[in-house]
Image: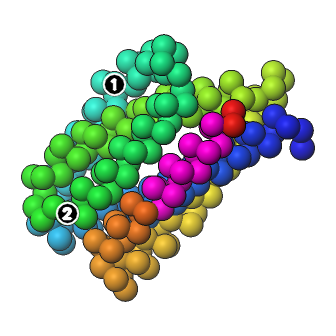
């Protein structure tokens, strides 16, 4: 493995705590919103739509911001926003309070989706970008292999709010890792 591949792997692995947390969160989110926040199916659908719509409306703008201000700060900021989302979800007690959280969540996904793959392309050697994206996607998917079972187990045995706080802590750890890895980039 050459030096460039090591940087791709290190950056990708720095995002693993966030991807595990995402898998934890989204695997039980509808249940949490229904059982704890007392939303019906239509209201749950509305929340997810608002988050996705925010991503649709901001992705191009955030891609331009990544080009103008740099991809690294946007990767870190997206993780900070995800940490805020997890913490905020652990503190609310009614679904209507999830509306602004879902806006932030959609914005954070758009920010990460615009900046992280572009950063991988920047780090990768020409002619190895496909392989670099494969490494990045493998780590992304690994988080989604680990996260759902972990999130479901934590929610089952310790409750949704504990699972959300664990997710917040994992993302915070990921922010530290990404900050370290990207400071050496």
Q: Dot 2 surroundings within 10 Å: few (below 14), some, or many (20 or more)?
A: few
Q: Residue at x 71, y 46 (%)?
A: 10
Residue 3 left/right relative to 117: right
Q: Is residue 49 visible?
A: no
Question: Looking at the picture, does residue 143 appear above or below residue 14?
Answer: below
Q: Are marks 2 and 1 in contact (CB under 8 Å)?
A: no
Q: Name the residue furthest right.
A: 1
Residue 6 left/right relative to 79: right
Q: Dot 1 surroundings within 10 Å: few (below 14), some, or many (20 or more)?
A: some
Q: Is residue 173 visible?
A: yes
Residue 156 left/right relative to 35: right
Label 1 belongs to which residue?
A: 58
Specify start and end residues of the magenta stretch as a single range: 170-183
Label 2 belongs to which residue?
A: 91
Look at the magenta stretch and give its main secondary structure. Answer: helix
Mark 2 or mark 1, earlier in chain? 1
Q: Secondary structure at mark 2?
A: helix
Q: Secondary structure at mark 1?
A: helix
Q: Quadrant of residue 26?
A: bottom left
Q: Residue 125 at what x, y percent from top left?
A: 81, 26
Q: Residue at x 56, y 43 (%)?
A: 179
Q: Residue 20 at what x, y percent from top left?
A: 52, 60
Q: Is residue 179 magenta?
A: yes
């Amino acid at each position: 493995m050459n030096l460039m591949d090591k940087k791709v792997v290190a950056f990708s692995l720095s995002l693993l705590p966030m991807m595990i947390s995402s898998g934890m969160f989204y695997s039980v989110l509808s249940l949490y919103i229904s059982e704890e926040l007392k939303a019906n199916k239509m209201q749950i659908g509305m929340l997810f739509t608002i988050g996705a719509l925010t991503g649709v409306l901001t992705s191009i703008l955030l891609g331009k911001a990544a080009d103008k201000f740099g991809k690294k700060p946007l990767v870190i900021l997206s993780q900070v926003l995800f940490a805020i989302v997890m913490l905020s979800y652990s503190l609310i007690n009614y679904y209507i309070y999830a509306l602004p959280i879902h806006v932030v969540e959609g914005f954070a996904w758009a920010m990460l989706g615009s900046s992280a793959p572009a950063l991988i392309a920047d780090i990768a050697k020409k002619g190895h970008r496909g392989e670099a994206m494969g490494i990045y996607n493998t780590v992304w998917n690994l988080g989604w292999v680990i996260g759902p079972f972990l999130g479901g187990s934590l929610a089952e045995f310790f409750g949704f709010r504990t699972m959300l706080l664990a997710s917040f802590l994992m993302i915070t750890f990921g922010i530290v890792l990404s900050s370290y890895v990207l400071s050496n980039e």
